[in-house]
Amino acid sequence: MVERDNEQWVGDLSQPGPQRDAALDDLRALLVRGLGYALAKYGNVREADMEDFAQDALLKVLDGLDSFRGDSRFTTWAQKIAVHVAFTELRRRRWRDVSLDGLPGVSDGDFLPKSWVDPSASAEQQTIQREILETMRQVIAEELTERQRRALVAVRIHGMPLAEVARQMGTNRNALYKLLHDARQRLKERMLDKGLPLQDVLAAFGS
């Protein structure tokens, strides 16, 4: 394997030819090895999976060469891309066989876990948190459309990946973004109408 500095990595990968082919082979090997360490705690990740993740990451690295600014080692930057690719795919697989309709709260109306109230907070703060939760329950149940409710509960409450929610709802990511944005805006407006503190309202939505 050829030792390269940042400039050499970018240069070798930028132009088609034997140098790029050699650089891709070297980088693929580095990424697979790095993924082996990063995914060690996931015992069910096969070597073939890591090869696939590395190949997908190589495509993203090539597409993003212009965005590399040299703030870190090139291989460190590429490895972060590979790890992100791997975690995204593993997370998607975890949800692949989970039905949107089977998620707790989607159909039974119990949208928000009581554990969202922080037991270590002051009595006043817990009261505010409970009021936020109750308002959210009411607005989700009564003022959102069915599609807004399904999307919001799946993504915001259960953490289902956007791509999987979009697939199960028969839509695309852009349309899902719009659906979620409208739902969140409605919830914020209603809670602010009730005089709940803006900081707490925004915190409830990660804003």
Image (spheres, helix red, strand yellow):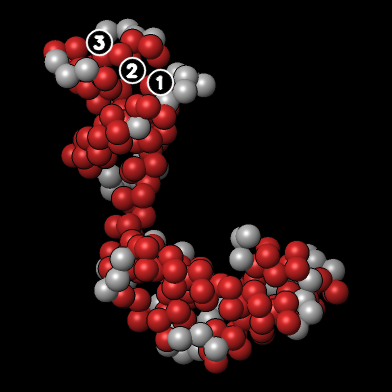
Residue 41, image x and y in percent?
Answer: 40, 42
Mark 3 or 1: the one toward you: 1
Which residue does the numbered mark 2 point to in the structure image?
10
Instruction: Provide the secondary structure element on which disc 2 rests.
Output: helix
Residue 78, image x and y in percent?
Answer: 37, 28
Q: Earlier in the sequence, mark 3 or mark 1?
A: 3
Q: In the rendered view of the protein, which quadrant contains the N terminus?
A: top left
At 32% from the left and 57% from the top, the residue drawn is 92
Q: Mark 2: which amino acid?
A: Val
Which residue does the numbered mark 1 point to in the structure image?
74
Tag shown at residue 1: 3
Instruction: Provide the secondary structure element on which disc 1 rests.
Output: helix
Q: Mark 1: which amino acid?
A: Phe
Instruction: Provide the secondary structure element on which disc 3 rests.
Output: loop
Using the image, determine if residue 87 lies above or below residue 138.
above
Q: CA distance from mark 3 to mark 2?
A: 16 Å
Using a 10 Å C-alpha cutoff, classify the residue at mark 2 as few (fewer than 14 neighbours), some (14 to 19) or many (20 or more): many
Q: Earlier in the sequence, mark 3 or mark 2?
A: 3
At 39% from the left and 42% from the top, the residue drawn is 84
Look at the numbered discs 1 and 2 and tell me whether their residues touch, using CB distance below 8 Å.
yes
At 55% from the left and 84% from the top, the residue drawn is 140
Residue 83, image x and y in percent?
Answer: 38, 38
Using a 10 Å C-alpha cutoff, classify the residue at mark 3 as few (fewer than 14 neighbours), some (14 to 19) or many (20 or more): few
Q: Mark 3: which amino acid?
A: Met
